[in-house]
């Protein structure tokens, strides 16, 4: 399938602040974070949109990544202590919006299950 160029505005339209998403930067690209309520879990979407050019990086294999990390506490400023769900790598084709939505839901569900499983093991 043909890759499409995703603009920052398109990514912001999909991952809206009023829905709980926060935009940050990391490694010269925009990263969108979602803190799960009641859990020390953050779902991250690495957008591939360059901080410097407001458009995707030009690498042919550059994909959108969605994954979850565990934080030391419920505070948003708590440090990250490890990963919970490995990254889903998504194509930047015409269906990228649907792929991101499905991946975010899947990662959220897996992160909750993994967190609860690990909590039971420690108890």
Image (cartoon, helix red, strand yellow):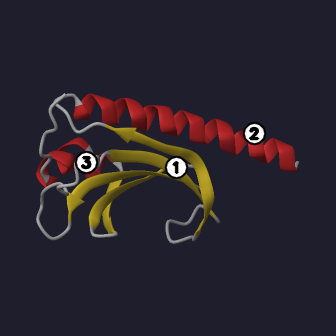
Placement of the N terminus among the 4 image quadrants: top left
What residue is shown with label 2? 117
Gap in Å between the C-alphas at discs 1 and 3?
18 Å
Q: Which mark is residue 16?
A: 3
Contact? badges 1 and 3 (CB < 8 Å): no
Circle 3 SS class: loop
Please report whichever mark, 1 or 3, sits nearer to the chain's N-terminal start. Answer: 3
Assess disc 2: are there few (<14), some (14-19) or many (≥20) residues with their C-alpha within 10 Å of its C-alpha: few
Residue appearing at x 59%, y 54% in the figure: 83
Residue 87 at x, y percent in the picture: 48, 45
Image quadrant in which you'd find residue 50:
bottom left
Q: In the visual, does 34 lie left or right of 38?
A: left
User: Is residue 39 in view?
Assistant: no
Q: In the visual, does 13 lie left or right of 79?
A: left
Q: Which mark is residue 68?
A: 1
Image quadrant in which you'd find residue 88:
top left
Contact? badges 2 and 3 (CB < 8 Å): no
Q: Is residue 111 above or below residue 95?
A: below
- Front residue (pair 15, 83): 83
- Front residue (pair 78, 19): 78
Circle 2 SS class: helix
Gap in Å between the C-alphas at discs 1 and 2?
15 Å
């Amino acid at each position: 399938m043909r890759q499409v160029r995703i603009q920052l505005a398109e990514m912001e339209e999909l991952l809206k602040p009023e829905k709980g998403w926060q935009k940050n930067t990391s490694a010269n690209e925009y990263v969108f974070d979602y803190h799960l309520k009641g859990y020390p879990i953050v779902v991250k979407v690495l957008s591939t949109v360059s901080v410097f050019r407001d458009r995707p990086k030009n690498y042919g294999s550059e994909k959108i990544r969605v994954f979850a990390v565990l934080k030391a506490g419920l505070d948003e400023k708590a440090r990250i202590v490890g990963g919970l769900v490995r990254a889903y790598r998504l194509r930047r084709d015409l269906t990228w919006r649907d792929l991101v939505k499905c991946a975010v839901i899947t990662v959220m569900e897996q992160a909750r299950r993994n967190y609860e499983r690990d909590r039971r093991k420690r108890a």
